[in-house]
Image (cartoon, rainbow, N blue to C red):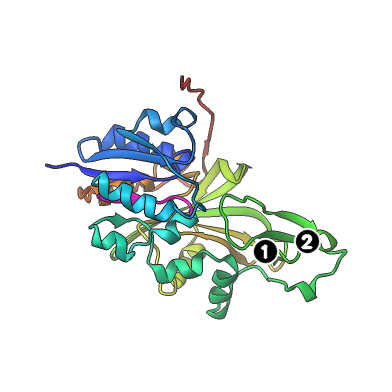
Amino acid sequence: MKKKTILILAGGTATAWHLCNLVKKNFADYFVMYVGDINDKNLIPASLLSDKYFQLPGINDPVYYDYMLNLLEDEDVNIIIPLIDTDLALFTGDNPDLLELNITSTAPSTETMNICKSKSKTGELLANHGIPVPKQYKQNDIDPEETYFVKPDTGFGSRGAGVLKGRDIPFPEKIVIQEILQRPEITVELFKKDDFWAYVCKERLEVKSGVCTKGRFFYDEELEETLHRIDPLLPFPIASCVQFMKNSDGQWCLTDLNMRLGAGTALTSTAGFGLASAFLSVLSGKNDFKSYLGKITDSSIVVRVYNEIKMT
């Protein structure tokens, strides 16, 4: 059996590290694994696990897209795995340049990403279909003395997000201004393949740099039903993660829609719901994904510790 060549982007993320470890442990017979990132390989632990490592141009560099297409073609890549929203938007599942090269992307469609790359557009679409999202404010609605949650309209990993007084909000930057919601903060991790659907909820007990490092796992039918209502509007890819918090009325509101694996996915794998392994199973062609998606005991808790790695 010929191995498939995969390229995992954003190689410095916790998600990439987790995927690389799973490939080495369970899928080494199915994949040749390449990793790419903007940093030197000596700063990327996943480079130690990869068959090849590529230091890439910055994602906002004008040459980036053409550079990536040439790399994919020259290296005979079969599957590209984007892990941040900008890459998801560039290398969509129906990207004609990738299709011409017979390359599969794990990102959703262009139509879906044209909405999902903008948090304001995503919120407006969902609200228009009766799906609860945080109340959004326009500049003219802002009270200088009130407190709001402010985040970039595009971005990931909670970068640039925070709580600000109205007088401190940086207009006219492209931002989303929302009501402040109440804990708990929940991530629902979702697997979807054709008509098969599996999920688990994770309460984010501790978060560092936007990444969950302590999580409590459970199931919630209301949150599951919300995801089923979202899917016809913005179809989920094989693996995704969706975040929720509660408003002042105690109603679950969707706060973030990530059409990819999340940085806290390794906690979920440890808990017994192998979303990342099921994802790799589909890509490999094994398609034994159901065997990885075990039912987790309610209120199971998983915590993350760090491992020091000498690179040079």
Query: Residue at the location (44% across, 53% down)?
Result: 63
The structure residue drawn at horizontal position 27% and vertical position 36%, both measured from the top left corner, is: 26
Residue 288 placement, left or right of 263: left
Locate the N terminus by quadrant.
top left
- Give residue 162's position: percent from left, percent from top: 71, 53
The verdict on residue 79 being magenta is yes
310 vs 76, left or right, is right
Who is closer to the viewer here, 103 or 189? 103
| Mark 1 neighbour class, 10 Å CA radius: few under 14, some 14 to 19, many 20 or more | some
- Helix, strand or loop at label 1? It is strand
Disc 1 residue type (three-letter): Ile
At 76% from the left and 72% from the top, the residue drawn is 139
Where residue 141 sits, quadrant-wise, is: bottom right
Work out whether 63 lies above or below 253: above
User: What secondary structure is found at the residue carrying circle 2?
Assistant: loop
Name the residue type under label 2: Ile
Circle on res. 184: none
Residue at the right extreme of this rendering: 145
Instruction: Specify which label sits upstream in the sequence, 1 or 2.
Output: 2
Measure the alpha-carbon separation of dots 1 and 2.
9 Å
- Residue 124 occupies which quadrant of the picture? bottom right
Q: Which residue is mark 2?
A: 169
Vertical relation: 149 (above or below) 284:
below
Residue on which disc 1 sits: 175
Do tag 1 and tag 2 residues touch (Cβ < 8 Å)?
yes
Q: Is residue 265 above or below residue 41?
A: below
Point out the stretch of residues depicted in magenta. Answer: 78-84
